[in-house]
Amino acid sequence: MKTGNFVPHPFIRGGHLQTIVSLRYRDDRIWQTTKTIVGVSDGDQIVLHRDEPNCTEEIRGNVLLIHGLTGCHAAPYMMRHARDLLARGYRTFRMDLRGFGASRKLVGNISHAGRSDDVLAAVKQIAADTPDHESISAMGISLGGAQLLLGMGQVAAGEFSLEAKHRLRQVIAICPPIDLMQCAQHMQRLSLRPYNYYFIRSLLDRVPPRVRQREDYHRAIQGRRPRTLLEFDDRITSQLGGFKNASHYYEACSARPWLQRIGVPTRIVTTADDPIIPRKMFEQVRGELPQCVELLEPQNGGHNGFHSRDGQNWVAGLIADD
């Protein structure tokens, strides 16, 4: 176990404040961006936003950035990580998960924790669009991190193929919900109802147009609005995703059973003050992790906050750490 060396900003202390600030921070300065549409399963399409560093030196590598639940390529934390990686000489690819951001009008299905094949499709596209000698790293935030870990385990187990595996330098998962049932039960707490309200409202507001036309969607949203993510997943996510109920969805799509199969250098970051992801999940799997998987456990940082005392982007530094 490593605790990491993150030191929080003196005015942004505590998991809740670190988390909230990460959703409000804004910096839109990205130098050169182009969009690539990538086909995925069921006739849907996702979008990659390719950002080129403004430098004359050789590219240090390529980094895929995967957002979390209700985010998109333009989420404040995605922009912050991309900007700082670009400044360090990396080319970045900000991914829009199925139904979010620029891919919202390109899908007839929803994203969920089991869409690891979408992440792998993004890696394959990056490999096809960049020189073979350049490395590829991938960083997933929250739900995106869980999808990434699931995908890496499935590739190692032979569930999916990934010809570009030899180019993968490292994968990093920031505050990933590796055990979906534990996370959902944790979110049932009354003190976390504001987070439930925020996520559910955002998810319902951003339902893709073609999904809204589906009969099963109209059946799923009948009655009062879900009050917790567990109820939302039981009534909506599982029904639209082809699962029997929330329990079936969580069991089928949790990354935890696949962690011990991962065969590429991996870092998983969890904090003691994360209000959304309970740390006990990682205590339970610590002894099961393969040698290539490193667990970083700083005391502070909230849920993908990591606003540091020195103003540096601690998360981006995990990628840039050669």
Image (spheres, rainbow, N blue to C red):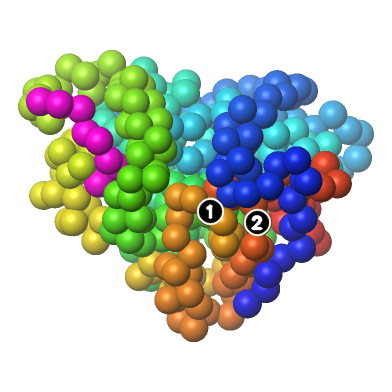
Would you say residue 102 sits in the magenta stretch?
no
Report the front residue among 240 and 160. 240
Helix, strand, or loop for circle 2? Answer: loop
Residue drawn at (48%, 74%), measured in percent from left and top?
283
Q: Is residue 55 above or below residue 304?
A: above
Q: Reading the chain from its start, which is encountered first: label 1 or label 2?
A: 1
Circle 1 residue: 274
Residue drawn at (35%, 32%), measured in percent from left and top?
197
Q: Is residue 282 left or right of residue 190?
A: right
Helix, strand, or loop for circle 1? Answer: loop
Q: Quadrant of the C terminus?
A: bottom right
Would residue 267 be seen by someone viewing this image from the given angle? no
Q: Farthest residue to the right: give it.
A: 56
Q: Position of residue 304 (x, y in %)?
A: 59, 46
Q: Is residue 143 above or below residue 215?
A: below
- Amino acid bearing label 2: Asn
Residue drawn at (63%, 22%), measured in percent from left and top?
34
Q: Position of residue 104 (x, y in %)?
A: 38, 22
Chain part drawn in magenta: 223-230
Q: Is residue 257 above or below residue 198?
A: below
Q: Quadrant of the N terminus?
A: bottom right
Q: Is residue 243 left or right of residue 149?
A: left
What number is the disc on residue 16?
A: none
Would residue 69 be seen by someone viewing this image from the given angle? yes
Q: Position of residue 315 (x, y in %)?
A: 70, 50
Q: Is residue 181 left or right of residue 128?
A: left
Residue drawn at (72%, 24%), measured in percent from left and top?
27
**Toward which corner of the image does residue 278 lie, by quadrant?**
bottom left
